[in-house]
Image: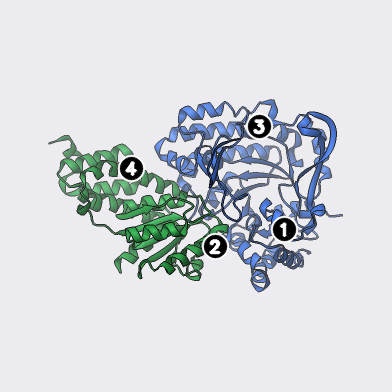
């Protein structure tokens, strides 16, 4: 038997990979399982859809359940990023089912991005096409990117309470520009309370990156 | 006469005094806005006498040192009288501007991080910078940084350090508690490596984290040792800065805390306790509830600021933990800043019940932010003062 065949059987290697990510196994073990999956002839997109995303789903569930925390989320993201570095060159764009398109950024006047970057990493690894405009983003830049990328979701982030007013302004500018009638606007960041979203005409406010991702997934299912 | 310090000490020991001590702290940007709005500068500006020009001129001059709104409003700040121990890197990094564009400035901070500051926006001249680079990235840079963390560096105590003389001065300060302040194991690592990298390293290089935390325990205990051993319970409170949680919960899991941090916490709190300093408050934003049992086991017995937006509720905590935790803050600053009925509802929902249960010092659930107007704060101050007397 091939040495990698001993690690896991053909039928369950993708399940094992997902479980390993969900358990936060070592990078070495996860890479071994990836090699096994590739050597057994699974395509990169199959590995992502049936292994990697399943693992991330487990991590998200454990985070929501209070078993995992920021540290675990970041490590899971790091594991998945490592896998995707190997898998991406093997994938053709059309091979992978895209969940949707997200345009993302921290609003003007705010230069903080830790939470935004965690959301980006999770969304990207979960199948969303993410266009990250960075920090301190002018409302006009959100409009410009939205016209170009035709997103399903516009994600606005703010850490500082003093920039909440800029979030409101951005929502108004984007809505006024009439980019897309069914564009969903998601707010995130420490300054944001859920009720604030409806007060300023956004569709939802997320308390953390995992919840933000779940909201995006729900929107895509409708 | 009962002083603010007496009231504070009574509350943290679950005793009742003639009145509750009301605790607030203010961002400097708030104070500056309020000065524009009519706060009398001569009543709140702090002057200190010192040798002129940082010790280069043999002139003794009154120098503006900051602002003290607490006596003006009748509240106290619990870091008003600090034991003067310097727990920073020695020597400091030289503060300097590294880059500047029309929108940002980047500068090297005294702790060796690179901070980016926005130059646009209404409050950007003051608001919180974004840290974009950190001095510790791996084992090699940690060993290099550690050279600046020598607890025996003579610069850690003031030039005029004389514990007995300081103790006498501390006794004269009755506007609040005397506090020894230091940085916790999580906050220290997050400051030196950045939040994402430090959190990741618990998994990617656990030996490095053990090494850093081992050293930080040694550094902390040895740095504060001369003050603690000499002053003992003339220090009312140890103030432990951590900031280890966000709205979802702690940044690390209870399991990780137990493995990496708990033994070190216990050794620091045991050291304090051996010297009769038995009140240790942790300063952490966010939802710290999943960690509270372990923190109590670690010897932490106070919590501030108990952020409402993160789901913290002092009434629930008091019912659950009884006298294991004294509590400070927890009045939603957003609701307080609205004034009127919203402010009164927030105060009424917590202060009367916690006043009876004891072990509580009312105040906003963090420093007073710039959005809180002077007029609304005066309204809040007038209202909460009605509740203070027993």
What residue lies at 84% left-to-right and 37% top-to-bottom? B61
Q: Give the colour chain B carries in the figure.
A: blue
Which chain is home to disc 2? A
Q: Determine which quarter of the picture holds residue A213.
A: bottom left
Q: CA distance from mark 4 to mark 3?
A: 38 Å
Q: CA distance from mark 1 to mark 4?
A: 53 Å
Q: For mark 3, what is the residue?
A: B223
- Give the residue at the far front of this rendering: B102
Is disc 2 in the same subunit as disc 4? yes
Which chain is home to disc 1? B
Q: For mark 1, what is the residue?
A: B34
Is disc 1 in the same subunit as disc 4? no
Is disc 2 in the same subunit as disc 1? no
Which chain is home to disc 3? B
Q: CA distance from mark 3 to mark 2?
A: 44 Å
Within 10 angstroms of label 1, few (less than 14), some, or many (20 or more) residues?
some
Q: Position of residue B307 (x, y in %)?
A: 58, 58
Q: Nearer the viewer, mark 2 or mark 4?
A: 2
User: Is residue B179 or residue A130 the one in the foreground?
Assistant: A130
Position of the C terminus of chain B, as image quadrant, is bottom right
Image disc number at residue A165: 2
Q: As drawn, is A75 to the left or to the right of B44?
A: left
Q: For mark 4, what is the residue?
A: A25
Within 10 angstroms of label 4, few (less than 14), some, or many (20 or more) residues?
some
Image disc number at residue B337: none
Q: CA distance from mark 2 to mark 4?
A: 43 Å
């Amino acid at each position: 038997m091939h040495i990698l065949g001993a690690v896991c059987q053909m039928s369950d290697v993708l399940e094992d990979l997902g479980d390993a990510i969900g358990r936060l196994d070592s990078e070495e073990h996860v890479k071994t399982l990836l090699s096994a999956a590739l050597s057994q002839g699974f395509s990169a997109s199959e590995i992502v859809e049936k292994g990697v995303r399943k693992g991330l789903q487990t991590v998200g569930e454990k985070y929501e359940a209070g078993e995992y925390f920021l540290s675990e989320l970041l490590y899971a993201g790091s594991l998945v990023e490592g896998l995707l570095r190997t898998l991406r060159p093997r994938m053709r764009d059309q091979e992978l089912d895209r969940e949707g398109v997200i345009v993302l950024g921290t609003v003007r006047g705010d230069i903080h991005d830790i939470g935004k970057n965690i959301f980006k990493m999770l969304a990207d690894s979960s199948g969303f096409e993410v266009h990250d405009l960075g920090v301190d983003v002018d409302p006009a830049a959100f409009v410009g990117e939205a016209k170009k990328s035709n997103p399903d979701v516009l994600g606005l982030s703010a850490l500082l309470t003093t920039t909440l007013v800029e979030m409101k302004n951005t929502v108004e500018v984007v809505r006024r520009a009439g980019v897309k009638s069914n564009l969903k606007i998601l707010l995130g960041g420490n300054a944001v309370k859920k009720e604030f979203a409806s007060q300023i005409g956004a569709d939802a406010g997320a308390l953390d990156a995992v919840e933000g991702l779940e909201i995006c997934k729900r929107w895509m299912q409708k | 006469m009962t002083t603010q310090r007496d009231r504070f000490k009574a509350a943290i020991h679950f005793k009742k005094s003639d009145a509750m001590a009301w605790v607030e702290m203010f961002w400097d940007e708030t104070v500056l806005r309020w000065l524009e709005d009519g706060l009398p500068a001569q009543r709140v500006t702090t002057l200190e006498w010192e040798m002129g020009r940082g010790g280069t001129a043999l002139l003794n001059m009154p120098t503006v040192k900051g602002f003290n709104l607490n006596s003006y409003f009748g509240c106290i700040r619990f870091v008003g009288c600090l034991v003067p121990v310097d727990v920073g890197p020695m020597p400091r990094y030289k503060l300097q501007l590294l880059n500047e564009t029309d929108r940002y400035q980047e500068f090297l901070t005294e702790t060796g991080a690179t901070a980016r500051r926005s130059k646009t926006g209404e409050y950007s001249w003051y608001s919180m910078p974004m840290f974009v680079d950190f001095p510790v990235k791996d084992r090699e840079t940690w060993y290099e940084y550690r050279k600046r963390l020598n607890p025996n560096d003579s610069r850690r105590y003031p030039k005029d350090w004389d514990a007995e003389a300081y103790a006498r001065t501390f006794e004269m300060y009755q506007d609040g508690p005397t506090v020894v302040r230091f940085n916790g194991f999580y906050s220290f690592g997050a400051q030196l490596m950045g939040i994402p990298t430090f959190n990741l390293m618990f998994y990617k290089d656990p030996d490095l984290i053990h090494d850093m935390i081992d050293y930080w325990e040694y550094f902390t205990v040895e740095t504060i040792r001369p003050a603690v051993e000499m002053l003992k319970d003339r220090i009312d409170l140890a103030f432990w800065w951590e900031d280890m949680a966000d709205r979802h919960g702690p940044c690390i899991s209870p399991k990780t805390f137990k493995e990496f941090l708990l033994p070190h916490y216990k050794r620091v709190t045991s050291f304090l306790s051996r010297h009769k300093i038995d009140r240790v408050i942790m300063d952490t934003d966010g939802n710290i509830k999943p960690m509270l049992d372990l923190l109590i086991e670690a010897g932490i017995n106070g919590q501030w600021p108990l952020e409402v937006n993160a789901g913290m509720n002092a009434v629930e905590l008091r019912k659950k933990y009884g006298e294991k935790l004294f509590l400070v803050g927890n009045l939603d600053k957003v609701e307080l800043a609205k004034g009127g009925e919203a402010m009164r509802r927030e105060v009424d929902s917590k202060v009367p019940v916690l006043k009876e249960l004891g072990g509580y010092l009312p105040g906003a659930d963090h420093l007073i932010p710039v959005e809180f107007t002077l007029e609304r704060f005066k309204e809040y101050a007038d209202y909460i003062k009605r509740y203070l007397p027993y």
